[in-house]
Amino acid sequence: MRFVDEYRREEDAQAFVRAIRARVTRPWTLMEICGGQTHTLLRSGIDRMLPPEITLVHGPGCPVCVTPLTQIDRALAIARRPGVIFTSFGDMLRVPGSTTSLLSVKAQGGDVRMVYSPLDAVRLAEQNPGLEVVFFAVGFETTAPANAMAVKRAKQLGLPNFSILTSHVLVPPAIEAILSSPQNRVQAFLLAGHVCTIMGTSEYGPLAARYRLPMVVTGFEPLDLLQGIHMAVSALEDGRIGVENQYTRTVTAEGNRPAQAVLAEIFEPCDRAWRGIGVIPKSGYRLRPAYAAFDATERFDVADITADEPKECIAGEILQGRKKPSGCAEFGTRCTPEHPLGAPMVSSEGACAAYYLYARAV
Amino acid sequence: MGCSMCLGVPGKVVRIEPSAVDMPMGVVSFGGITKEVCFAYTPEVVPGDWVLVHVGFAISKLDEDHALEVFKTLKELGELSELDVPQPARKS
């Protein structure tokens, strides 16, 4: 497939590995933000091809993983109600809440449906005027414009039976939380290419300047990641700070302006709890007051439902790059993808699940 | 399968329907598989363009010139690395 296959050629990957090896003179620790990138790094074996000086630690950019147990329990409570069609991206369906998962609710007769696009959920609301249609609006900046458009469309259509349960997270405040920690060991970031496709790169310049480190906007194919690592290592070796862009075929400095405009119309920033990390100020989105009627938390009165995370899980340290999954006593024993204790084992894009799947650290 | 919330899939625009409500919909082909896609965030796109699609939305037009940059870099790196090949010692 075009724009895909050409970025996966083994001989080109080896050429980048040689170039990285030629450039590196001392140990460096890099963090990729996005869970999709973690997955590609492990699946394509890039982590094993790199010279030993380079350590990759894996960031908090898996929206499924960082959705708090509380929010999943609220989703389950809504999905169990009669007269509700609960819609979600496929990734969230298997995630266990405190007692069960959306798939189990479906097996017990709940009307839980996987949708490809949030607009499909709006269409379901149009087609089922006698039922409440709820969409689990999870995701980073990449997905938020699609979810925002669903709300905008529902309002245009005057649909009284559509609402969203929001669990949106934002990348820059999470990077700030990682960098401001005294235990931080990250020396350069590979930024999530699709988040920057929407938001552009200007948010990151002040962060890179304040913490004096390089950040490279990076794509998702193996060659993208290797080039991003090469650019980050070159910047580190040369003492360069600031934002560089590897993923130029889709990321511009200003980002997607029409998407940003709809985001700003529908959502406003709010403090947000990240599973395994805790509350990060201004790191999420909630509906603006003008769109509060579409808030499923209010409509179904589930704000009182809360849940505690299992204490054995060291997700906070994993998601901030302080520890690798192999550094956890429960990894692969008490904690597996079938029975996850915490966030990074929950989704296949989580760092612990990726290590388990690709048999790292066993 | 990757995470649906970070996945962006490149596809070629087949057609775009005009829309009265700022929400133009159209069809994108992904290597022969077609999907309905919303073009509200890429108003500049026309049929034949390549776009990046995320959860049913075209989120950017793929820049064909920039798409080749990685290979230009590779070529330059390849040419540089030839300079690193040690030369046989000259006979004195």
Image (cartoon, grey):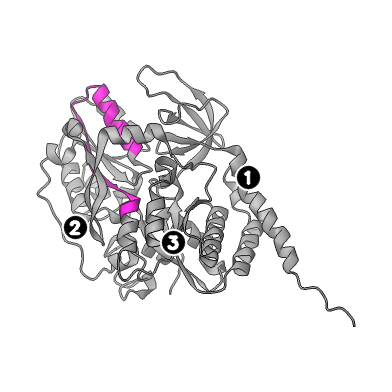
User: What is the x, y in percent for residue A203?
Assistant: 38, 48
Mark 3 residue type? Leu
Residue B57 appears in view: yes
| Residue type, mark 2 in image | Ser
Q: Residues within 10 Å of mark 3 (few under 14, many from 20)?
A: many
Outermost residue toward the right in this view: B92
For badge 1, the amino acid type reads Leu
- Estimate the spatial distance between the alpha carbons at disc 3 and disc 2, rounded to whole Å: 39 Å
Q: Which residue is mark 3?
A: A213
Please identify the quadrant where the C terminus of chain A is shown. Answer: bottom left
Residue at mark 1 shares a chain with residue at mark 3? no
Task: Specify the subunit that label 1 lies on.
Answer: B
| Residue A98 numbered tag | 2
Q: Nearer the viewer, residue A314 or A218?
A: A218
Displayed quadrant of residue B92: bottom right
Question: Which residue is depicted at the point 65% across and 50% down?
Answer: B71
Taking the magenta stretch, the answer to whether it contains residue A274 is: no
The answer as to whether the residues below labels 2 and 1 share one chain is: no
Coordinates of residue A49 in the picture (x, y in percent): 57, 67
